Image: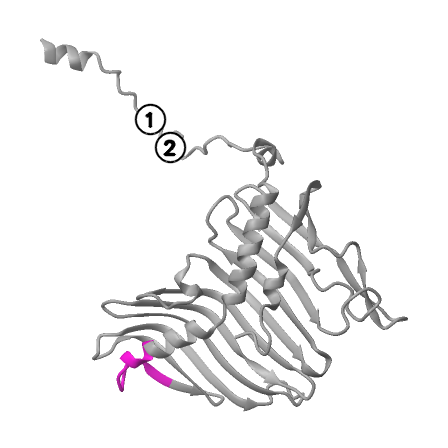
């Protein structure tokens, strides 16, 4: 009796119209701008903290650990795995195989070590590590992912020296600490440029590109040609460089719902005086904007960009 009652109390099964199974569901959408109105933007203190941390992180990021891991990974190759080829003077490997030493190579990789090369035909002498590929290299205890390119090195000219580090793509390493930026969870796609003119006591740093995978409410940050100049003997009002602590450029910060822009003062070149003029106040601060809403001033530790003397690394 109990069994009969329990079955009898169940709702009747209704056959589904075959056409109903393919009918689209109703749209569920938000009005434009509603997500920004639902939550508050990050505080100025949080924006400042993330920018300061990211500037310091950007100073650490170079292609060196990636090149080193790639070089170490090739130690597991044998005579036939991976297969090596040559194209226009460059040697690269391509394929999917497991070597006799137990290292699996899947994809392709090209590495070139430029030594004392005039890469740009302008008289500069460059020493550069260049690595490009899309590959996974694994052993029983390690895994390395290469998904882009690395350009890392320096060029010496008559009046100045330039250093460059460019990372474009995705890179991952699971195989122990490297004592470098690769031990962090962030994902950089950065181009950093450092220039030094010894005769003029002039140095400057430029950072472009993004850092993703940040923890907290701000998940990513983008540098738009953030530049800082150090001019030891001619910094000050009316001189060659008008403000020692004022960066140029913009920084964009991403949350799950909005972009925040921090814009620094413009420094423009005056042809008449043949000097740079600061448009605004020499205070190292930028203006933070949430779309068209002004949030306030953000004063950052841009001096980290120039925490080097003879060379940046």
- How far is the residue under mark 2 from the one under mark 1? 8 Å
60 sits to left or right of 8: right
* Rendered image: mark on residue 100: none
Q: Is residue 125 left or right of residue 216?
A: right
| Quarter of the image that includes the N terminus | top left
The residue depicted at 47 percent of the width and 69 percent of the height is 148
Residue that numbered label 1 is attached to: 16
Q: Residues within 10 Å of mark 1 (few under 14, many from 20)?
A: few
* Residue extending furthest toward the left: 1
Q: Is residue 80 magenta?
A: yes
Q: Is residue 192 above or below residue 30?
A: below
Give the percent coordinates (x, y) of residue 162. Answer: 62, 79
Q: Secondary structure at mark 1?
A: loop
Position of 264 with respect to 212 (left or right) is right
Rendering quarter of residue 241: bottom right
Give the extent of the magenta segment: 73-84
Q: Which mark is residue 21?
A: 2
Taking the spot 33% from the left edge, 26% from the top edge, the residue there is: 16
Q: Which sits earlier in the primary sequence, circle 2 or circle 1?
A: 1
Coordinates of residue 272 in the picture (x, y in percent): 90, 71
Task: Please name the residue shown 48% across and 65% down the image.
Answer: 169
Marks 2/1 in contact by CB < 8 Å: the verdict is yes
Residue 135 or 11: which is nearer the viewer?
135
* Along the viewing direction, whichever of 235 and 7 lies nearer the viewer: 235
Whether residue 258 can be seen here: yes
């Amino acid at each position: 009796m109990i069994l009969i009652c329990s079955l009898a109390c169940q709702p009747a099964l209704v056959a589904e119209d075959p056409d109903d199974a393919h009918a689209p569901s109703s749209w569920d959408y938000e009005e434009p701008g509603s997500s920004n109105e639902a939550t508050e933007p990050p505080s100025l203190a949080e924006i400042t903290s993330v920018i300061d941390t990211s500037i310091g992180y950007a100073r650490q990021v170079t292609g060196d650990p990636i090149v080193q891991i790639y070089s170490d990974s090739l130690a597991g190759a044998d005579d036939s795995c991976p297969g090596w080829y040559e194209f226009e003077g460059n040697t690269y490997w391509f394929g999917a195989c497991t070597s006799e030493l137990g290292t699996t190579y899947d994809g392709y990789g090209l590495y070139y070590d430029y030594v004392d090369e005039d890469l740009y035909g302008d008289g500069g002498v460059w020493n550069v590590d260049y690595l490009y590929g899309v590959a996974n290299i694994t052993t029983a205890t390690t895994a390395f992912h290469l998904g882009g390119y690395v350009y890392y090195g320096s060029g010496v000219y008559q009046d100045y020296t330039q250093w460059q580090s460019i990372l474009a793509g995705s890179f991952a390493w699971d195989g122990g600490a490297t004592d470098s930026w690769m031990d962090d969870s962030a994902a950089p796609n950065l181009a950093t440029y450092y220039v030094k003119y010894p005769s003029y006591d002039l140095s400057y740093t430029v950072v472009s590109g993004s850092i993703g995978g940040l923890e907290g409410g701000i998940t990513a940050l983008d540098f738009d040609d953030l530049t800082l100049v150090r001019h030891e003997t001619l910094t000050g009002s009316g001189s060659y460089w008008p403000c020692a602590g004022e960066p140029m450029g913009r920084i964009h910060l991403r949350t799950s719902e909005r972009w925040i822009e921090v814009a620094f003062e413009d420094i423009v070149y005056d042809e008449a005086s043949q000097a740079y003029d600061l448009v605004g106040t020499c205070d190292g601060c930028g203006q933070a904007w949430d779309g068209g809403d002004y949030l306030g001033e953000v004063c950052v530790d841009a001096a980290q960009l120039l925490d080097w003397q003879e060379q940046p690394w």
